Amino acid sequence: MLRIIAGFENPDAGAVSIDDIDILPLPPNRRHANTVFQNYALFPHLTVFENVAFSMRLKRASRKDVQLKVSDYLHLVELDGQADKMPSQLSGGQKQRVAIARALINEPSVLLLDEPLSALDAKLRQHMLIELDSIHDKIGITFIYVTHDQQEALSVSDRIAVMDKGNVLQVGTPYEIYESPADIFVANFIGETNLFQASVKAVEGELVDLEVPELGDIRVTTTCPVSVGATVNFTIRPEKIRISRAQPTLASEYNILQGTVEEPIYTGFQTKYFVRIDGTTTMKIFKQHINYTDEGPDIHWKDSVYVWWHAEDGYIVEDRPQ
């Protein structure tokens, strides 16, 4: 998709518009789109300054204009004082900033980013995400950001398009994509979830009673029309589920199940529990550690536990289109 927008590939059908203008007839150099490549693609024999100035040199801009504009964009990406260094003298994060400055100096309408943080370690990746978001806010142009990292997509995006094998399965805000996945693929691909096939037993307005073979009778709310007897897919995110050794007393809108802890995994800010329900299936439950007084997990391996969630927290998703 990025190569089509940039003009390096031709689509079999359709149009690509920037500011309501179809850019497909235009050669790459006349499209207001610049690319930040996965491997940075910096010129190793040029300094940071000359890498950023490259496109301005091609346009035969004056020396004064080059100096002022390159300085402005190096300041934007916080590389003041690095202008005379060679790419080999830079860290991965600094190389990425040079690549961004080089792409932005042309003042494109759209900036294309091809997995720009994949080569960085986890902590630097998180830092660069914040930096990219800050640069975007300052520049104010559209960024099209390709990533296979779901957390990156959720963290930095205003809108997400989930694609598989060339098909766009859902477009929406990060909240919509995560909380209201369009189908099974999106539900599984974005974040972690518990997914089960079920049949509809009863419908009362937005409240639906499901029969889930692995779990028993489950209540869920839905705004999608469903009919009694229909086969549907039911999903519930692990962080929506509560867990306790004591049986809770709750209203009928809550689903309460009993099971045995197969595996507790402590990760610092949360514990992931894998709970076997009635000896047949395993559910994932994430328990957040909110207070310092949470002295580690109070539920252990092989403990008998209750898990529960509100009907509104579950979701009915469609089968993936073939």
Image (cartoon, rainbow, N blue to C red):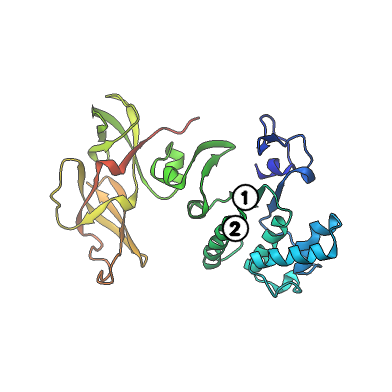
Identify the residue at the far right of this view: 60
Question: How far across and down, in percent of the image, does residue 23 sit?
Answer: 72, 37
Q: Nearer the viewer, residue 114 or 69?
A: 69
Please, is residue 208 above or below residue 154 in the view? above
Tell me the amino acid under the disc marked 2: Lys
Please, is residue 85 above or below residue 154 in the view? below
Q: Is residue 283 left or right of residue 102?
A: left
Residue 43 visible in rendering: no
Taking the spot 46% from the left edge, 33% from the top edge, the residue there is 320
Under circle 2, the secondary element is helix
Q: Which residue is mark 2?
A: 138
Question: How far across and down, in percent of the image, does residue 100 sit?
Answer: 67, 59
Tell me the amino acid under the disc marked 1: Ile
Taking the spot 34% from the left edge, 48% from the top edge, the residue there is 237
Residue 7 visible in rendering: yes
Q: Is residue 21 left or right of residue 314?
A: right
Under circle 1, the secondary element is loop
Q: Quadrant of the N terminus?
A: top right
Please, is residue 289 above or below residue 58 in the view? below
Q: CA distance from mark 2 to mark 1?
A: 9 Å
Q: Choose top left, top right, bottom left or bottom right for residue 292.
A: bottom left
Identify the disc placed on residue 52.
none
Question: How far across and down, in percent of the image, does residue 226 sit?
Answer: 32, 26
Q: Which residue is mark 1?
A: 141
Q: Is residue 134 left or right of residue 297?
A: right
Taking the spot 84% from the left edge, 65% from the top edge, the residue there is 63
Please, is residue 143 above or below residue 298 in the view? above
Taking the spot 58% from the left edge, 59% from the top edge, the residue there is 132
- Badge 2 crowding class, 10 Å Cα cut-off, few under 14, some 14 to 19, many 20 or more, is few
Q: How many marks?
A: 2
- Badge 1 crowding class, 10 Å Cα cut-off, few under 14, some 14 to 19, many 20 or more, is some
